[in-house]
Amino acid sequence: DTGVSQNPRHKITKRGQNVTFRCDPISEHNRLYWYRQTLGQGPEFLTYFQNEAQLEKSRLLSDRFSAERPKGSFSTLEIQRTEQGDSAMYLCASSLPGPDYEQYFGPGTRLTVT
Amino acid sequence: GESVGLHLPTLSVQEGDNSIINCAYSNSASDYFIWYKQESGKGPQFIIDIRSNMDKRQGQRVTVLLNKTVKHLSLQIAATQPGDSAVYFCAEIPHAMNSGYSTLTFGKGTMLLVSP
């Protein structure tokens, strides 16, 4: 257990529905990251926050995806109008800024869109 | 031996053997590299890192080697144990850390299978 928690662990939804995932980072970490991982691939960066500011977004993050970190603590990732191609593991990680770089990953949320 | 599975290259070793997992990275400007271990149903777990001003770094039972000339990274695991069975990913930072960006780019993983 790295100290990063994600909920839910599994989500099955029908195409066209909206889903929201939550990430609770390690409390003293002010950087928070979202990644997507499909079977057999490494995680792909989606977005990251420093405190409540969203500082970078990947081109993978289509306009159906939105992430928030309103108080600089937990974060949510929402996918609207889900598509079958959204089926993946969604990973959250957190870290301290600066030279101590290590990102601690949560266990992920497995999304299946039917 | 090493084989290419449906999704991941796989390295199969016997318990007690030394394992070497290789990674070719893409960006010559990357200056920080990390190896992660991912067990089934879990997120990636940090193993060891290395900065581009080094060519070797050792941890407990693990060694990372960096060859910047050919953009190659390797992870050596000594006395491999069944608990080492997992998928291993290398990751690089494509921007200088001083820029403030922290975006990790992961390589394709290698599955390590350790037989007792």
Image (cartoon, rainbow, N blue to C red):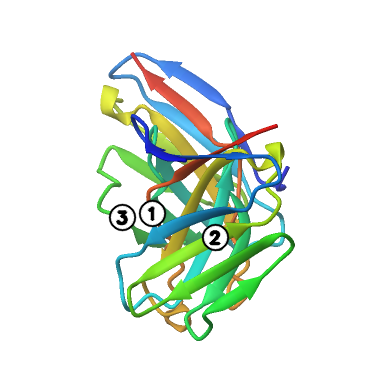
Residue type, label 2 = Leu
Q: Earlier in the sequence, mark 1 or mark 2?
A: 2
Q: Amino acid at mark 3?
A: Ser
Q: Is residue B81 left or right of residue B28?
A: right
What residue is shown with label 2?
B75
Query: Are labels 1 and 2 on one chain?
Result: yes
Label 3: element kind: loop
Around disc 2, counting alpha carbons within 10 Å, would you say few (fewer than 14), some (14 to 19), or many (20 or more)?
many
Badge nearest the viewer, 3 or 1: 1
Cβ atoms at labels 2 and 3 below 8 Å apart? no
Residue B43 found in image quarter: top right
- Identify which residue is drawn at 38% across, 54% down: B107
Q: Residue at x 66, y 43 (%)?
A: B84
Residue designated by label 3: A58
Q: Give the spatial CA distance, label 1 vs label 2.
A: 13 Å
Find residue B42 and report its image quarter: top right
Q: Residue at x 72, y 47 (%)?
A: A3
Few, some or many residues within 10 Å of mark 1 (<14, 14–19, 20+): many
In the rendering, at what x and y percent does residue B37 appear? 58, 48
Q: Mark 2 belongs to which subunit?
A: B
- Which residue, given by chain and number where applicable, does mark 1 sit on? B107
Discs 3 and 1 lie in a common subunit: no
